[in-house]
Amino acid sequence: MLIKVLSDIVAVMTTDAQLEKMGFKIDAVTEAVGRLILKVDGLDTKLEDLDTRFEGLDTKFENLETKVEKGFAAVGSEMQGIKTEVHELNTRVGSLETKVGDMHETLQAVEKAIDIDAVTVIDHERRLSILELANG
């Protein structure tokens, strides 16, 4: 595009004589335009290279996005598994609490029975001691 514009500018300057009157030498102008065309070609090449690099970046970003989505899905799945395991643990702990409570009640009953038996044994020992002293 720029080359076309430069060519049009040179074409407007119709004669070599007009250019020379303006203080330009034809060889110098031709050389300058040639250098400019080479620079524009170099810029076109660099722009194409940048386009290629940006396309590569787009692909990399798409790949990254896919990996992130898969990662979040995997984390979500793991979290669901952990949630299930925690629920199962809570159920087991609740069951254990019930069993421990039942055991506590049973032990309290056994303790009372042992206390009653101990009192009975002590009473019998006292009676036996009294009887032994009386027979004695």
Image: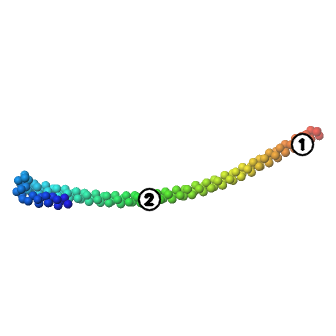
Q: Residues within 10 Å of mark 2 (few under 14, many from 20)?
A: few
* Residue type marked 2: Glu
The quarter of the picture where residue 40 lies is: bottom left
Percent position of residue 1, x then y: 20, 60
Mark 1–mark 2 Cα distance, whole angstroms, equals: 86 Å
- In this rendering, position of residue 15 left or right of residue 98: left
Q: Residue at x 69, y 51 (%)?
A: 100
Spot occupied by residue 120 in the image (x, y as percentages of width and height): 84, 45
Instruction: Tell me the residue at 39%/60% (across/down).
Output: 63
Asked where in the image residue 45 lies, by quadrant, the reply is bottom left
Query: Which mark identifies residue 74?
Result: none
Task: Tell me the mark number nearer the camera, choosing from 1 and 2.
Answer: 2
Q: Residue at x 16, y 56 (%)?
A: 36
**Residue farthest along the front direction in this orientation:** 12
Which residue is label 2 attached to?
69
In the displayed structure, 35 sits above or below 121; it is: below
Lower position in the chain sequence, tag 1 or tag 2: 2
Q: Secondary structure at mark 1?
A: helix
Residue at image point 63% right, 53% down: 93
Apparent side of residue 116 relative to residue 79 in the rendered image (left or right): right
* Circle 2: element type: helix
Nearer the observer, 8 or 37: 8
Q: Which residue is mark 1?
A: 128
Position of residue 83 in the picture relative to residue 96 (left or right) = left
Q: Is 136 on the left or on the right of 16, as rendered?
A: right
Is 12 or 6 nearer to us in this picture? 12
